[in-house]
């Protein structure tokens, strides 16, 4: 059991440096990575990308298209910036209302994280959600009962968990304070 947890922790550490692999056309046609639209006022976060209203994007989608779709659902970007120090290579990020940050490399979507609002953030005009029952602010008991849940033992970033092998998050004060997928710039 301990070896499996150490393996999972290692996999999540590598996920923090994931390059956001693009699914092959065969994977898309086989339905292994379905990208269905959601209601016009919803951004649904997914392990392989996100859907913003009527548009869905895999990791590797174009930055302009993703930012435009997120802006239509949540409102205009709050801030953007670059992090040249990221271990996965330089990252550009864009923060949107509702606590959503989209990560880009070479003008392509490579990851996202959904976090509690920062000072000065406005609420989104739409809703951000993760498919399933676990959401930002969910109690620990709901997260621990979720399919694919496992704690990340020995995380240097706080109380970290995994939901399957592509989504991770953090718990503070017995509630989910962040959920993420794809390339992140966490310094472990």
Image (cartoon, rainbow, N blue to C red):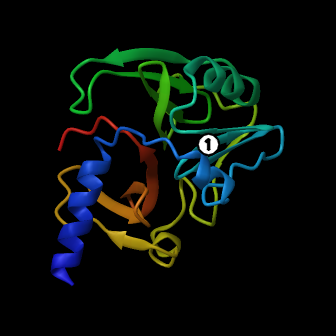
Residue 12 appears at what percent x and percent y? 29, 56
Q: Residue at x 26, y 18 (%)?
A: 84
Residue 145: x and y, percent? 50, 79
Quadrant location of the C terminus? Answer: top left
For the N terminus, give its image quadrant. bottom left
Please state which of residues 168 and 51 is positioned toward the viewer in this rendering: 51
In this rendering, position of residue 94 left or right of residue 92? right
**Residue at the (48%, 18%) spot, across then down:** 107
- Residue 16, placed above or below residue 2: above
Question: In the rendered image of this protein, does residue 11 appear above or below residue 144?
Answer: above
Element type at marker 1? Answer: strand
Q: Position of residue 166 (x, y in %)?
A: 43, 57
Q: Indicate the position of residue 47 as horizontal and vertical percent values.
A: 52, 52
- Which picture quadrant has residue 123? top right
Q: Is residue 25 left or right of residue 15?
A: right
**Residue hosting label 1:** 50
Residue 53 sits above or below residue 136 on the image: above
């Amino acid at each position: 059991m301990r070896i499996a947890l150490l393996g999972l922790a290692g996999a999540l550490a590598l996920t923090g440096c994931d390059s956001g692999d693009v699914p092959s056309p065969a994977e898309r046609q086989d339905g292994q990575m379905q990208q269905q639209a959601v209601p016009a006022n919803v951004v649904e976060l997914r392990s392989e990308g996100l859907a913003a209203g009527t548009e869905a994007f895999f990791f590797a989608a174009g930055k302009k298209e993703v930012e435009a779709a997120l802006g239509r659902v949540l409102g205009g970007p709050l801030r953007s910036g670059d992090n040249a120090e990221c271990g996965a290579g330089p990252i550009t990020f864009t923060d949107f209302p509702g606590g959503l940050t989209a990560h880009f490399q070479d003008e392509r979507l490579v990851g996202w994280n959904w976090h509690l609002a920062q000072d000065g953030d406005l609420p989104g005009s739409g809703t951000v959600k993760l498919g399933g029952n676990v959401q930002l602010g969910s109690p620990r008991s709901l997260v621990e009962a979720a399919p694919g849940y496992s704690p990340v033992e020995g995380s240097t970033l706080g109380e970290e968990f995994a939901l399957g092998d592509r989504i991770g998050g953090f718990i503070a004060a017995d509630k989910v304070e962040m959920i993420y997928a794809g390339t992140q710039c966490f310094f472990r």
